[in-house]
Image (cartoon, rainbow, N blue to C red):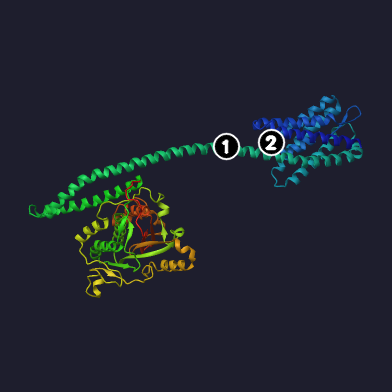
Amino acid sequence: MAFSKVFFINLSVLITIAYLFNIGYKYLFPNVSDRLKYAISMLVFVLAGWVTMLFGLRVGDTQLFDLRFVPLIMAILVFARPGAFLVIGAGIGAGRLFYGVNEASWAGCMNMALLGVFAALINWYLQRVEWRFFWKACTAVVAINVLNAFDIAVMGVIPFRVYWLEVAPITLPLATLLSGFFVFMIRDFHKEQLRIGELRGMNIILRRQTKELREAKRDLEEKARQLMLASKYKSEFLANMSHELKTPLNSILLISQLIRDNDDERYGMDEVRYGEIIHSAGNDLLQLINDILDLSKVEAGKMDIVIEPISPLDLVQMMQAMFQPMADQKSVDFLVEYAEDVPDTLYTDALRVNQIMRNLLFNAFKFTETGSVTLHVGVELAPENTVGKRRLRDWTSVLYRGRTGAGGGLGARSSESTTDRIRKTVFAAFPTTGLARTGQKRPDSAGPEAATPMGANVQPTEAAGTLAATKSLDVLSAEQGELSRRLPRKQEAVMEQWLTLAVEDTGIGIDDEKQQLIFEAFQQEDGAINRKYGGTGLGLSISLQLARLLGGSLALRSEKGKGSVFTLRLPLKSEPPEASEPVEG
């Protein structure tokens, strides 16, 4: 009974020490180095062994029974370095000498030193086996208790036979049970310490990462500011230099044109040929300068958009007149399909629409060796909140994130509309009888043949507000009809009309992974395309951004080796905008 009381007192003391150590570890040592924490932990284990001896059971004048070896059991499951067990065992053993120096105290000191060596060996073994904590703890508890009993029987003052027959049957099971209970109870304290250490380490890492992120954010903001400033300077430089280059270049073009025309036969054949070469190269250079100027204006937000009424029919006539000679030269069919429900008037910027369509048609003819180029003109219906969510790939929202009105303005360039001025220029160079709607005669027509312009192949189309049922757009038209049937009546008021100008060719086509690349400035599908066909890679980039400024979009559908379909969508406005003064972005 006396052994039970003493061992329970020892266990209570050890639990109290463990609890106090846990509090101190949590609140007093958060900023202490790991090495110092390690040393303090070993010292606490030694002091715990000393305190158990203070409340031990004395038998006679020299013998002392207690649970001083329990801290060593816990150390096996906590520490990983062999030196820690030697220090703890020797330290607890040295404390036995404070209770009297005699044969029993020296035996107790040597016993704890040997247990420290055994603890190091047990820890070394347990680190190399993949056991659960339960089995490791049981192994440590049983091994240390048995070894402690054997050492006491061999080195103690109690005879070996007497100890194993009278003392060990009481102390060994009781010490094993209580030490095991203590180990599993203190396990929670140890897990909490590990958890606190992990959280503290994570907090340190998070603070370090937060500091690094702040510094990186400041660096990125500074670099972004420098890039924006450099982009601004670049755009201003390109705009200024483009203007400066156009002045002498126009003079060169005029002089080369005079030499080429040679009205008074002042120059010989060689001079005329040289003048033709200079004039052709100058025109190419002027086109490049104009493209760079347009791109710099859009990037700088200085592209003015002038909204005015234009005729889609006149626009198509001009495109047909411009590109029919190119089609004849390449022996490629140029087809125009014009739906009956296309309105007579469209409010938009005629100059920019003309520029977009010229870029699309020029690319179509440039990359088409055989087959045909078809211009589809029609009307598309879609709810305002679903515009842009189509099967055709729309790169406007991907590549150009500017505001709808960024760099845009409303107003009038002159009393004469841009369409009239473009029409005069085009038809002066390419006379044609014009283009009529499908199934509708022109007022001056004398017969059925008069509805078709000279040199144009006009295909009849379906009515009821859809595009022609061609192989490139039939799926889109069917989807639009199904969409309009599914919409409830209350949404009919928010249906928005779009004019679609789709350029379909049977050319080389574009790979899927390159379809986004070609809309970037100075980019083409690959180097081989650039070497074979030439070009600067600015046309589609400018067209995309102009379409955005006009409130529309530019979509692409293509398959390598089978051709491409570029679709320009422009909003149909029934009334002109209220603004009357041009505004720059």
Q: Earlier in the sequence, mark 1 or mark 2?
A: 2
Around disc 2, counting alpha carbons within 10 Å, would you say few (fewer than 14), some (14 to 19), or many (20 or more)? few
Three-letter code for the amino acid on which mark 2 is drawn: Arg
In percent of width and height, residue 375 lies at: 32, 65
Q: Quadrant of the N terminus?
A: top right
Q: Nearer the viewer, residue 467 or 358?
A: 467
In percent of width and height, residue 269 lies at: 10, 55
Q: Secondary structure at mark 1?
A: helix
In percent of width and height, residue 184 lies at: 77, 42
- Residue 243 to residue 114: above or below: below
In percent of width and height, residue 414 lies at: 25, 52
Q: Return the residue at label 1.
A: 207
Q: Nearer the viewer, residue 569 or 493?
A: 493
CA separation in Å, label 1 and label 2: 31 Å
- Residue 249 to residue 395: above or below: above
Can residue 67 be seen? no
Q: Secondary structure at mark 2?
A: loop
- Residue 91 to residue 306: above or below: above
Q: Nearer the viewer, residue 336 or 13?
A: 336
Q: Return the residue at label 2.
A: 81
Can residue 461 be seen? yes
**Closer to the eye: label 1 or 2:** 1
Three-letter code for the amino acid on which mark 1 is drawn: Arg
Around disc 1, counting alpha carbons within 10 Å, would you say few (fewer than 14), some (14 to 19), or many (20 or more)? few
Q: Residue at 18% x, 47% y: name it.
A: 251
Residue extending furthest bottom?
447
Q: Quadrant of residue 526?
A: bottom left
Q: Nearer the viewer, residue 327 or 575?
A: 575
